[in-house]
Image: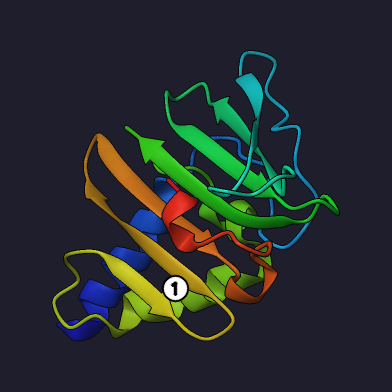
Amino acid sequence: MRAHIAILVTSVFAVLACADAGATLGGAPSDFGSATARARQLSASAPGAAAVPYTITETTLDSGTVVREYAGPGGQVFAVSWNGPFLPDLRTLLGERFARLQAAAGDKKRGRGPVQVNDADLVIESGGHMRAWSGRAWLPSALPAGVGAEVIQ
């Protein structure tokens, strides 16, 4: 029974990964490859900081899901977040780190509830239900100086 639940959870992540998201955590910002995706770029800074230590690129995918990429001064994506009716393509969004999310989903006892990875080098929080998915992932060591996980929404 546990194997069936693990396969189901993994399948849900794979099947619901229908939106075209091209960002990769730890890589360069993406263009999302969708002609109808709407993107806006925001400058942000940590409270009390004089300089702008990161940018946020927010894209609404064709599915209605909003994906945000947080990039540091060097252009590397240090965090991503998603919120909407469908999961974005988490395999693409997380890149090589997707396998760690799959492993965490497979380790869940009941196959329900949020999936989390909380390691020194990677944090992933993903959960929701049909038509209401959200999550975020970040590289703690890549967070710009003065920026905490609370800014990743």
Q: Indicate the position of residue 1 as horizontal and vertical percent values.
A: 14, 82
Q: Indicate the position of residue 55 as horizontal and vertical percent values.
A: 69, 40
Residue 151, visible in the rendered structure? yes
Q: Indicate the position of residue 63 as horizontal and vertical percent values.
A: 44, 25
Residue 152, visible in the rendered structure? no
Is label 1 in a helix, a strand or a loop? helix
Q: Quarter of the image holding residue 44?
A: top right
Name the residue beneath numbered marker 1: 102
Q: Is residue 40 above or below residue 145?
A: above
Q: Is residue 83 above or below residue 104?
A: above
Q: Indicate the position of residue 3 as horizontal and vertical percent values.
A: 26, 83
Q: Which quarter of the image is occupied by the C terminus?
A: top left
Judge left or right: residue 120 versus residue 26.
left
Q: Nearer the viewer, residue 120 or 46?
A: 46
Residue drawn at (57%, 48%) of the image? 48
Q: How is the image coloured?
A: rainbow
Question: Neighbour class for label 1 at 10 Å: few (<14), some, many (≥20)?
Answer: many
Judge left or right: residue 135 versus residue 120.
left
Q: Residue furthest right?
A: 74
Judge left or right: residue 98 versus residue 29.
left
Q: Is residue 43 above or below residue 75?
A: above
Q: Nearer the viewer, residue 117 or 44?
A: 44
Q: Residue furthest top?
A: 36
Q: Nearer the viewer, residue 40 or 24?
A: 40
Type of amino acid at the residue the image marks with label 1: Gln
